[in-house]
Amino acid sequence: MKKVVIITGASSGIGLAAAQLFAEKGYTVYGIARNQYKSEKFKCYSCDVNNADGMKSIINEVAEKEGRIDVFVNNAGFGMGGELVETQVKDIQNLFSTNLTAVAVNTAIVGQIMKKQGYGKIINTCSLSALFPLPYQSAYSASKAGIEILSRTTRGELKPYGVYVSTILPGDVKTGFTDARIKGKIDSETVDKSMQKFEKYERNGMSPNKVARKMVKLADKKRPAPRTSVGALKLLIILQKILPIRLLDWLIRKIYC
């Protein structure tokens, strides 16, 4: 029997790469994205992840049709750059709603199903910014830090029922995420220079296929790790455990400013 996976943000970038790879590996794949899209490799649903009723309807429909949901990937999200004080309130609210609140709500929805069936994997696309305060990306970093904590706590809640929650933390990835990033008003040379560095690193980053391969490996493991990173800057994860906060923050700013 084929395993069943649902992936949000499946129309482009990491989500699309993951959906295609899971399909190639023999999974029955259901992708969810905000806009209408098509694929010959997997079933496509259109729904905003912030639409809790719509997401619940899709998830329940897949569970009823397939009789199971083996893997759920919370991947949908977007970036935001610039000074927080120069960012529109509605954009900040939308970012947290999409990047964090929707992840919590959809984890609760699919977690109920997995809890009843007695198994399942939930993989949350996070970011190295969950561990490090990236300059001029405060809201984005905070939303990803929230995913990290949410994942660790829900893992403890669901593990007794055979359900494992994991985060995957990619470094710089070359996708449309860069151009889609929302930016606040940039009226400082320092901010502009930092944003240009971020974009340069991302445009020269790894392929989303590399992240997708790591996702499939996590899904295939009997007991996947709570957290796994992909790409460069792994040294920072080690330093994060031993350096004083003030020194670590200084080092991050030296890299990105």
Image: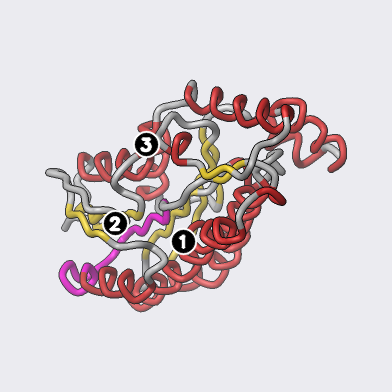
Image vertical order of residue 211 relative to residue 202, above or below = below
Residue 145 horizontal/vertical position (percent): 63, 53
Q: Judge from the rendering whether residue 250 lies leftward or rightward of residue 192; answer left or right.
A: right
Residue 83 horizontal/vertical position (percent): 70, 44
- How many neighbours does mark 1 have within 10 angstroms: few (below 14), some (14-19), or many (20 or more)? many
Which residue does the numbered mark 1 point to in the structure image? 164
Rendered residue at 80%/38% (across/down): 249
Q: Choose the circle earlier in sequence order: 1 or 3.
A: 1
How many angstroms separate mark 1 from mark 3 (CA)? 18 Å
- The label on residue 213 is 3
Q: Secondary structure at mark 3?
A: helix
Q: Which residues are magenta?
A: 62-75
Q: Secondary structure at mark 2?
A: strand
Which residue does the numbered mark 2 point to in the structure image? 32
Q: Choose the circle earlier in sequence order: 2 or 1.
A: 2
Image vertical order of residue 210 relative to residue 6, above or below = above
